[in-house]
Amino acid sequence: MMDTDDMHPERNIEQYLEYENVINRPGLLGDISSLLGNLGISINTINGVEKTRRGLIVRTDNIDKLRRFVYISQYVEDINIIKVRKPEVRDRLAVRHGRFIKRDEEDKKIFRFTRDEIGILVDFLGELFMEKKHRLIGIRGMPRVGKTESIVAASVTAKKKWLFLSSTLIKQTQRTSLLKGEYDDSNVYIIDGAVTANTTNRDHKNLIREMMSYPAVKVVEHPDLFIEDMKYNMDDFDFIIELREHEDQKITYEKHKKKHWFENEDMDFFSGF
């Protein structure tokens, strides 16, 4: 980790740079760092992101300096530039954790995690919560895999207040109204899509419909069940998270469609942290 903001405050253009080590010789990283520095480009963060790749968050006062670096690198046989772009959440996490989070090849808004990657998932959600955007996020996963604890932990990380509109945590929750002070576009609103889909409480469903149009972050557990009953569709979601115990675990919904599926589902809240 490097922090040069105080030394060069004028370098306020942030970019993500990723390159492949074609010939991983000793001293290569030092040579690359020196070249960037000589061109007026500061390195904020650097890490290996794949076996032969490095990712960097860099800052400069002029994007042309980075273009010059890319041009010069064409004549350096040791590296191959892969990406240069404004940092995305996925880029920041790759540099922070040293690996890319898994993304569906066909549907780019689907991201996959396993239980042992909950720390990365919390960081991912935390970054999304901190962005000044109104997100609708769906989380798929079997009972007791860590969906709720990840959302709450990410809210803490992002210093956001969270409110359960429907939930199975400790006891079944079906909110039918919110207090005036609970309407806040900086809050994270959590909806258990299975609870909401199974209820016959009209006041609860009316509140959910109201909050779906409210400009704030909403996280829906079991989004497939939610859209089936509430007449939304997957295109309404900005991100879909899939959380599994292991990569081969299948996510099914037979249990969730039973009337008492919710009993004791999440009583191990924060276990594993």
Image (tube, rainbow, N blue to C red):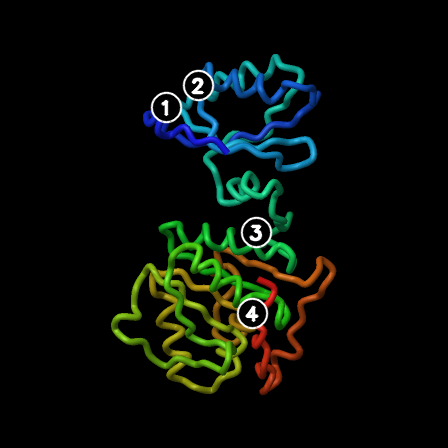
Write down the residue under mark 2: 65
- Residue under the point 49% across and 19% down: 36
Per the image, the residue denoted by label 1 is: 61
Q: In x, y percent, where is residue 271?
A: 59, 68
Mark 2: amino acid:
Lys
Question: Which residue matches tag 4?
Answer: 222
Determine which residue is flagged by label 3. 120
Label 4 residue SS: loop
Q: Quadrant of residue 250?
A: bottom right
**Front in this rendered view, residue 74 or 101:** 101
Q: Whole-percent x and y of residue 171?
A: 49, 82
Q: Could you tell me which quadrant the C terminus lies in?
A: bottom right
Query: Does 150 sit above or below residue 266?
Result: above
Q: Give the foreground label among 3 and 2.
A: 3
Left or right, 256 with respect to 130, comes to: right
Judging depth in this view, the residue of 47 and 67 nearest the camera is: 47
Which residue in the rendered view is the most extreme toward the left? Answer: 180
Is 120 situated above or below 91? Answer: below
Cβ atoms under marks 4 and 2 closer than 8 Å: no
Residue 39 sits in quarter: top left
Residue 251 screen position, x and y as percent: 67, 67
The three-letter amino acid code for the residue at tag 1 is: Asp
Which SS class for mark 3?
Answer: helix
